[in-house]
Amino acid sequence: MNGPDDGRDGPGGPGGPGGRRPGPEEQQVGGAPRIPGPRGAAGTLDPAHAPPPQDPPPAPDGAPPTAAESPAPGGRAPEPRSHTVLKSLLGAWALAACSAEETQAVEEHLTECAPCAEEALRLRDAVGLLHREESLDLKPMLRSRVLEECLGKRPARIPVPAWAGPYDTETARLDALLRDFGDGEWETPVRLKWFEEERRRTRRTTVAGVIGHLMTVDGLVAAALGLDDPLGGGAPQQGGATARTEHYWSSAGQPPTRHVRKPWREQGHALLRTVSFAGRGAAGLTVDYGPFALPLGDAFLERAFECWVHAWDIAEAVDYPYDAPSGPDLNRMIDLAARLLPSALAHRRRTGLAAPARRLAEAGAPGRTLRLEIEGSGGGSWDIALDSPAAAPSPEHTVARIALDGAEFCQLAAGHISPEEAAVGQDGDREAIRDVLFAAASLSRL
């Protein structure tokens, strides 16, 4: 703020930093130009020879009072600033370092002075270059930290069940990736990969086609909860997720576009809202996938896993980095795959794709076991029953061990890499190791 006029230059005035000191003809007292005339001994205007003050010319009728005529607080008229003073303030104005009064004066001046307006624009552009360049991507754990902070201060009245948390997280992460996609990116080709019988299968689609696929399979969970099926009454009754996806792709009048994002996201919100309100009452439901069925909690975990895998496919197609899930969520996804391995082994054995059981055991009795050790984030150890899903795994009956990185195991279970490509640390029965690796790959599907 400007203090009382004591005849000295203030920090924002002509004699302050960044401005030049005016010459004798430009010295000001109280904001008004000095009038040349006889000087006293100190170089100031001799009052004896000063011309009498003159009244300003009258304003036309109805014209608003000028700045010099407008009364200021305390009855004093505001002091106008010269072009030189206002020009010297442009640097501070561009840096937002002016006082409120100085800012108003400069901005009023810019509407009348074209050279100063051009200089102000150049200074503003230069100030923009001074800021350090930062990535526009959100930090991976920012959403989790914000939610944890909010819920810690005010817990949700109706929280999302713990078993639905990974699905909530992975759909939100994928939606954040899709939010800024342009039309061209939604049409980017994506090659889906999975493992069937003894070889890898692929299918070409687009980013929008992948989201349509996720929405269609999520519809199986919606049907189990009594919600609307996105395919309506025309949904195929046999074939499970693969048949539904093929029906969706073939029945659409035109290829899916970015407009598929909204119904997919709304369906995800509806699923989470429904299980949150249902609470423990929904835990006993089963989701029918056609060839197999899963309890509702495992179905939500399976949908989280597929959402992450296909988000990875999309990110790879548009050349964008995408991180694995958090350690706890990844551990739960690996745990689901490990629990499904005995049934997958039995199915492959029935179709002649795996070696026959070496030793049958009664339900609950200990049998031959393979030790699966997953390293890295989300890792742990699991004992896999080899001869029967009903047998109890037993450390005393361990015949083989497999060690894998967590992300690589998930890529194997998603069918993105073949059992031969997996970098596996292995020890023990080679036949059992091969059967388990191929069973893990067989968990994948379109």
Image (spheres, rainbow, N blue to C red):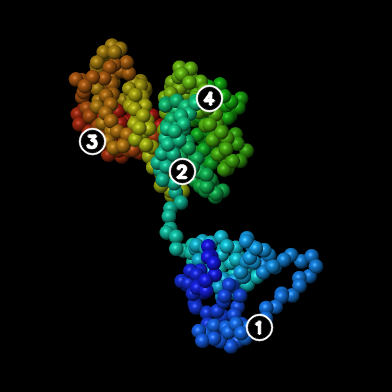
According to the image, label 2 marks what residue?
314
Q: Earlier in the sequence, mark 1 or mark 2?
A: 1
Q: Is residue 117 visible?
A: yes
Under tag 1, what secondary structure?
A: loop
CA–CA distance between discs 3 and 2?
30 Å
Answer with left or right where residue 292 lies relative to residue 107.
left
Mark 2 is on which residue type?
Ile
- Image height check: is 430 above or below 260? above
Q: Earlier in the sequence, mark 3 or mark 4?
A: 4
CA–CA distance between discs 1 and 2?
82 Å
Under tag 3, what secondary structure?
A: strand
Q: Looking at the figure, which quarter contains the C terminus?
A: top left
Under tag 4, what secondary structure?
A: helix
Answer with left or right where residue 360 lies relative to residue 78.
left
According to the image, label 1 marks what residue?
51
Q: Residue at x 41, y 39 (%)?
A: 145
